[in-house]
Amino acid sequence: MNTIQEMFQVWSMLERMLAFVLLAPLLGGLIAGIDRRVSARFQGRYGPPVLQPFYDVLKLFRKERIIVNRFQNFTMVLFLIFTIFSGALFFAGADLLLTIFSLALAGTFFVLGGFCVGSPYSHLGAEREIIQQVAYEPMVILMAVGMYQVTGSFKVSVIAQYQSPLILYLPGVFAGFLYILTIKFRKSPFDLSMSHHAHQEIVRGMTTEFSGPTLALIEIAHWYENVMLLGMVYLFFAFNPWLGIGIALLTYLFEIFIDMNYARFKWQLTFGSSWLFTAVAGVSNIIVLGLMKI
Amino acid sequence: MNALIFLILFPLFISLLALFLPRALPGRKVIGTIANAVLCAVPIYLLFATLDQGPSYFRLESGLINIGMLVLEVLIAAYIIYLSVRAKRYLPVILVVVQLVTMLGFEFSYGHSIQVEHSMFLDKFSIIMALIVGIIGSAICLYGFGYMPEYHEHHPEVKDRRNYFAFLMYLFLSAMFGIIFSNNLMWLFFFWEVTTLCSFLLIGYRDDKASRDSAFRALNMNLIGGVVFAFGIVILFVSSRTMELDKLLLLDQGVVLLPAVCFAFAGLAKSAQFPFSSWLTGAMVAPTPVSALLHSSTMVKAGVYLILRVSPVMENTVAAQMLTLIGGVSFLVTALIAISQSNAKKVLAYSTISNLGLIVACAGVNTDAAVWSALLLIIFHAVAKSLLFLCVGIIEYKLGSRDIEDMDFLIMRLPKLTAVMMIGMAGMFLAPFGMIISKFVTLKAFINTNPVMAIILAYGSAATIFFWTKWMGKIISIRHGETEVREHEVSNWEWTTLGILAVATVAVCIAFPFISFHVIDPYLMQLFNTVPVVDTFNILIVFVIMFGLLIILPLGLFYYAFINKDYKRVGTYLGGGNISNITYEGAMESSQPIQIKNYYLEKYFGEERLFYIGVFVSLTLIFIMFGVTAI
């Protein structure tokens, strides 16, 4: 049953990083394919083949390189590099906070890409992307804080091998994290800056001016990020690896379910509700833990 | 000891020179440059000369100096009273009189019995401050050489008093060196009041209504701090017969707690924490070098310096918790307000208060890790913030506006300046730069002591990301065809300063393990006998990111600028009705220009809405702080 934990211990840090870099896009793409299939079933459609996201990305790579300015694609390359780097740090078992900060750096490059093209649609998307970042950031930091309070360490490797179930100590934090996870997965009702759904926008927000290979890079970065986020969900249940993986996948299904059932929120509601939910669920949990320790 | 006295007297000498040397003198700027180089060099010399030494204390025959200071204090008071009466403002008069009566009464009743063993001292914290004041302060003065002529060109209505301006700037630096080297609290108080006077006169340099208002606001608030400082000195001496900073820490907490709280209060006023924040945001009416000086190396840093010095006395008291919360409230509320501001200088001002709030909060927590990050925050903030102020100062004259909304396409108009500014902004909030390293440690320190502060930090950091990122986005947006480059108009004085500070922003990040090991850790050993353990693996990763960026960024920019030719350029998408890159076809075949604006969310984070919340909450906390201490 503990094969996953054993595997984790046997592999060296570099091996784990390499495994993430190589396997995460495959897993992320597969999840995206299943996502599309399941979503289609929710809507009463048949849906594309499971491997469709891979076909899409490969096709994008063969498209013509159309740009507005010469440097716009560089920001997205940086976004991809730092997303991969953060994910690799996470799976190597490094410091959770550092992973979060590094992911924020990646997110900043993404937003700057949206700004630098100087197109109104893209600009609006970028503004909304910042609002989304600001909406989820407190909860992500508080998740790290909560895990530190319980396990006494920010190290992912320590947290992952913590023997008692973290979820019992951090139910509020987990609930808050689930809430903002919808933003991170770019799912409705929080897919303000850009969306995968054709019915919500024709012009695709943030990524309006990005096409061809660069769009493929953004998609791949998104896969990496999703795998990393599911890894974070796993941490809450890491005392039992199979349960952890099961819950992580269930979480994703749950997000698809939410995605299908909600129309997009306005940014006011997205932002306000995220901070409020963080305050109610996350903050109260943190304070209770703080009081328990004293 | 000679170096310390030199550092206090040399800027004083330069300031007098600046006042009396005729402006037409050709060698003026050369003399200034040499003076600035000396001001940079001496603190660096101090750093290396005392690298492995503990704190050293110096005795100075002080009878004559004390009398001299007293006379000067009376003169300063008289001058302030004169100016205030002339401007028909009476609050400063009352404050100055109260302060003067307190100090003179104290001097006459106890003066003969004051025994001061060591008047001056030098430890690692003073060296850090000396480096900041010396290097950044003189860099800002250097910038002034290029800036002030242009300032007077743009403001013909302002009387040209450049000599007087330079006099005040160097006097300010001299007083700062005085503050950080004084062990005798009477001396510290004297220099403290000199900085108050200098900031008052510098803010009022324009001499119009707005700047007079701001100057008097700054004066009032700092005088309130000064009065409480004076009370603190009297209470301290009456209860414990001590007049020395180092002895303060050795005394029984019950005896010195009230004076320490008084000093911390004075520090709060000087570092523009709530409820005193409004003087710093008002100070932006002054010429840019003044703002840069107030925000980075002098004034506000003097405030947190004093708070950090006295906070060990307050260990484990309710007063310390209140101090932490005041810092926390200032940090969070001003970060939120900054979101709603489009005036660049105001955003910078609020961000300064916010960062200082974090430092004050660390001082209140007062564990080894908290103080460690407080010192790093002081360093990183000083460098990056002065850089940003100076950039905005240049932009203001090149674009004719200091509004962020007017900084569209800045990267096309002032490319090098934009690059420098990006470094400064990244230094303020992005991994792997300094601020984030210290925030990281701060967060750990907070969780272990006060989870509420960790929550405040989480929300405040999110707000910080918001206002920096959207500003960054504004200045790097590119529109094809917008190529009016105005960069050649920036003077070499200004470029030199920007260059020094930009390199320093990156260099302090690279050098931070060195700074931590050789300067901060010894200081912490002296205070706590422990040093925080910073995970070497984390530092390694930070360096990987940093060097990664330093390599990838130039290479990438080079590749996309010169090598990559495989693309087809099109105009931006404007709903399919493009006429040109910036206009589209509206209804009735009209031609509509596009305009891009940022979000400011006034409704949520408006200044008037949040400012008073901050003021009232912090006032309450201050009353509690004094209340529990007095009881």
Image (cartoon, rainbow, N blue to C red):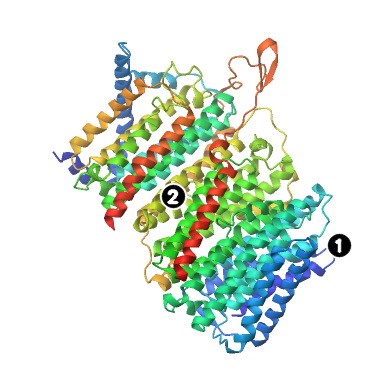
Residue at 60 percent of width and 36 percent of height: B474
* Kind of residue indicated by mark 1: Ala
| Residue B263 % position (x, y) | 54, 69
Q: Nearer the viewer, residue A287 or B474?
A: A287
Residue B401: name its quadrant: top right
Q: Is residue B42 visible?
A: no
Judged from the image, the secondary structure of the residue bearing numbered disc 1 is: loop
Residue B164, numbered circle? none
Judged from the image, the secondary structure of the residue bearing numbered disc 2 is: helix
Q: Which residue is mark 1?
A: B24
Taking the image as shown, residue B352 lies to the left or right of residue B96, namely left
| Residue A50 % position (x, y) | 29, 18
Contact flag, marks 2 and 1 (Cβ < 8 Å): no
Q: Which residue is mark 2?
A: B457
Q: Specify the subunit that label 2 lies on.
A: B
* Kind of residue indicated by mark 2: Leu
Q: Specify the subunit that label 1 lies on.
A: B
Mark pair 2, 1: CA separation = 52 Å
Residue at 76 percent of width and 57 percent of height: B205
